[in-house]
Amino acid sequence: MSLDALNALPDDSRLWLIALEPAPDAAATERLAGAMDAYVAEWRHKGVQYAGAWTLLEGRLLTLAEPTMTTAPSGCAIDGMMRKVNRTLDELGLDRVDPMASVLVRTASGLRTLPKAELEGHLSDGTLDAATPVLDLALFSLGDLRNGKLEKPLAATWIGRKFKVATTA
């Protein structure tokens, strides 16, 4: 899927990114699509109907955006949304990448989840270098995603600072 499903939303829409590990197969993706379509269509809290949209980027990045949550956030509506999404993922047997324990990087073979505890070893053996793209699952706005801020070279991230990885010239 592409960002086309989010085209109607403004750049300042609030964004949530959930990385799935591994990428779901075709049947699970179809079931996920049905559940997410239904959920987004009925997403409401305390009489407020939310106008969210979602997509599955690269077959494994569940991407949800909503235009009013940036300026008028509702913690209860966000919590309810996350509970429903997580319950759906659990029912489908889809695991999530824990961003507290792992990072998602782009390698020649595609997206790869690496435990944070193994980063130093991957830097030492050359699996990772200063230019390796690291995905930022904490992006706040749809505009950031549209403007290419999902990926940063490793040297420009906390990983580069922690392990003193110099930016390549």
Image: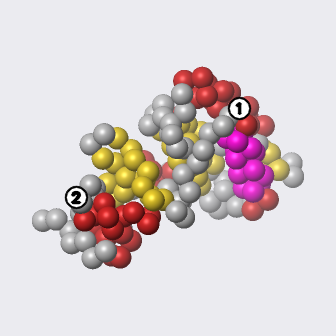
Q: Position of residue 41 (x, y in %)?
A: 73, 34
In front: label 2 or label 1: 2
Magenta stretch: give its range.
77-90
Residue drawn 27% across the image and 76% down it: 164
Q: Position of residue 18 (x, y in %)?
A: 56, 49
Residue at 61%, 28% in the rendered image: 28
Q: Front-most of 32 and 140? A: 32
In the drawing, does residue 152 fall left or right of residue 146?
A: left
Drawn side of residue 21 relative to residue 112, left or right: right
Q: Is residue 63 above or below residue 122?
A: above
**Residue under label 1:** 35
Task: Judge left or right: residue 71 versus residue 25.
Answer: right
Counting residues from the start of the chain, the first of labels 2 and 1 encountered is: 1
**Type of amino acid under label 1:** Ala
Residue 86 is inside the magenta segment: yes
- Secondary structure under badge 2? loop
Give x and y (percent) for residue 13.
57, 52
Furthest-left residue in this view: 169
* Disc 2 packing (10 Å; few <14; some 14–19; many ≥20): few
Is residue 167 something that shows in the picture? yes
> Where is mark 2, residue-wise?
126
